C-alpha cells in the first residue's frame, strides 16, 4: 500500500510538473480540433506547427502527420476529436521503445559513470540515485572524479553524508583518472556494490573534456573488464533542443548507455522526452520532477503519457 501511495504521489507530481508542457501542447491541439469541422490539410498544418512548438521534434511530427493522413485515407478517422487519441497512442508507442529501467546485478561490482554538462543537475541526480539504490539494499560508493571544481567535490560530499554512503575523493586538480583508479582498486577489494562516478561537466564542445572522459573509461576497463557498465548522461529538460545536441555529442564521442532527464517540473519543453526517444534511441532510465529526494524515478512511458494527457491537470 505504501509503495502504491508513493507511486500515486509521484504520478501526481509528474502531472503537476508537466502542467506547462500540457498547457502548451494540448491547449493548442484542443483549440485546433475544436475549431475544425473536418480533417483537411489546414488542420494538419496547424497541428504540425503546434507539435513542433511543443519540442516533440520534426521527426516525430512528420511521422505522426503521415500516419494520420494514412488513417484518413483508410477512413479510420471520422472526426477531428479522434486525432487526439491517435496522438496519445503514437507517443506512447514511441516512448515504450525507450523504456528500459536500469538493471544492476547483485553479484559483482557495477560501475556507473555519470556525464553531462554543468548545470544539468548531475550531482543532485547522483545523490538521489545513491539514495534509491541504498533503499534497495545496495552497497553504494560515490566517486568524486570532477576534480577541476572544488565546489563539485564539496557538493558530492554533502550528498554522500545526506544519504550516508562512502565517498572516494582526492584534492582538487588531481588527475580524475587517478581518482577512478583508486576507486576501482578499493571496490575490487571489497564486497559487490555500485560505484557511481561523478565527472567534469565543462562545455560539451571542449575536445579536452571528451578526451579526459575517454581516458577514464580506458582506465576503468583496464582495471575492471566490462566497466563502466553504464554511462549515464544527465540532460536538463528546460534546454529543449540543446539537450538533444548535447546527447548526440556525448553519444558519438564516448558512448552513452542511458539517459536521465531532469527538471521536467516547471518547463514547457517536456515534449523533448518524445523527441529524445524518437531521434536518439538511447534508453531513458530516469526522470526528475523536483527537489525532493524521491523525485528521481525510473522512466515509465505509461505514467508519462497519462500525466501529459491528464484532463485539467488532474
Image (tube, rainbow, N blue to C red):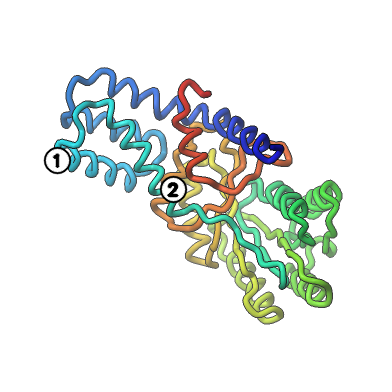
Quarter in which the N terminus is drawn: top right
Image location of residue 124, percent across then percent down? 71, 46
Left or right: 88 with respect to 142?
left
Residue placed farthest to the front in the image?
Answer: 1
Image location of residue 2, percent across then percent down? 71, 37
- Residue at x-position 34% and y-position 23%: 30
Callout in the foreground (1, 2): 1
- Residue at x-position 50% and y-position 33%: 307
Left or right: 32 with respect to 105?
left
Quadrant position of residue 209: bottom right
In depth, the one of 4 and 257 nearer the eye is: 4
Residue tagged 1: 74
- Residue at x-position 65% and y-position 80%: 225
In depth, the one of 250 and 210 nearer the eye is: 250
Label 2: state its secondary structure: helix
Distance (Cα) linking label 1 and label 2: 26 Å
* Residue 210 higher or lower than 133, as above or below: below
Sequence-first disc among 1 and 2:
1
Q: Residues within 10 Å of mark 2 (few under 14, many from 20)?
A: many
Image location of residue 103, percent across then percent down? 61, 61
Left or right: 92 with respect to 104?
left
Q: State if disc 2 and disc 1 touch (CB < 8 Å).
A: no
Label 1: state its secondary structure: loop
Residue tagged 2: 95
Amino acid at each position: 500500500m505504501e509503495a502504491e501511495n508513493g507511486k500515486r504521489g509521484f504520478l501526481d507530481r509528474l502531472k503537476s510538473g508537466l502542467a506547462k508542457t500540457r498547457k502548451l501542447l494540448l491547449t493548442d491541439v484542443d483549440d485546433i480540433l475544436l475549431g475544425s469541422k473536418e480533417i483537411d490539410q489546414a488542420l494538419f498544418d496547424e497541428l504540425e506547427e503546434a507539435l513542433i512548438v511543443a519540442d516533440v521534434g520534426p521527426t516525430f511530427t512528420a511521422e505522426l502527420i503521415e500516419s494520420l493522413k494514412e488513417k484518413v485515407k483508410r477512413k479510420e478517422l471520422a472526426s477531428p476529436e479522434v486525432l487526439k487519441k491517435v496522438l496519445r497512442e503514437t507517443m506512447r508507442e514511441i516512448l515504450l521503445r525507450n523504456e528500459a529501467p536500469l538493471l544492476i546485478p547483485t553479484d559483482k561490482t557495477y560501475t556507473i559513470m555519470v556525464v553531462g554538462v554543468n548545470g544539468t543537475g548531475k550531482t543532485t541526480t547522483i545523490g538521489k540515485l545513491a539514495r534509491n539504490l541504498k533503499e534497495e539494499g545496495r552497497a553504494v560508493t560515490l566517486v568524486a572524479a570532477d576534480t577541476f571544481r572544488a565546489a563539485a567535490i564539496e557538493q558530492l560530499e554533502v550528498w554522500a553524508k545526506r544519504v550516508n554512503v562512502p565517498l572516494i575523493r582526492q584534492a582538487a586538480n588531481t588527475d580524475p583518472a587517478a581518482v577512478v583508479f583508486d576507486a576501482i582498486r578499493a571496490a575490487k577489494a571489497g564486497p559487490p556494490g555500485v560505484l557511481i562516478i561523478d565527472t567534469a561537466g565543462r562545455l560539451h564542445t571542449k575536445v579536452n573534456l571528451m578526451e579526459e572522459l575517454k581516458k577514464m573509461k580506458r582506465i576503468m576497463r583496464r582495471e575492471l573488464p566490462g566497466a563502466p557498465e553504464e554511462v549515464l548522461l544527465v540532460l536538463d529538460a528546460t534546454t529543449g533542443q540543446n539537450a538533444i545536441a548535447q546527447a548526440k555529442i556525448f553519444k558519438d564521442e564516448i558512448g552513452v548507455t542511458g539517459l536521465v532527464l531532469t527538471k521536467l517540473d516547471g518547463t514547457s519543453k517536456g515534449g523533448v522526452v518524445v523527441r529524445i526517444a524518437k531521434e536518439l534511441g538511447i534508453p531513458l532510465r530516469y526522470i526528475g520532477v523536483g527537489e525532493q529526494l524521491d523525485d528521481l524515478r525510473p522512466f515509465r512511458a505509461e505514467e508519462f503519457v497519462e500525466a501529459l494527457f491528464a484532463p485539467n491537470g488532474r
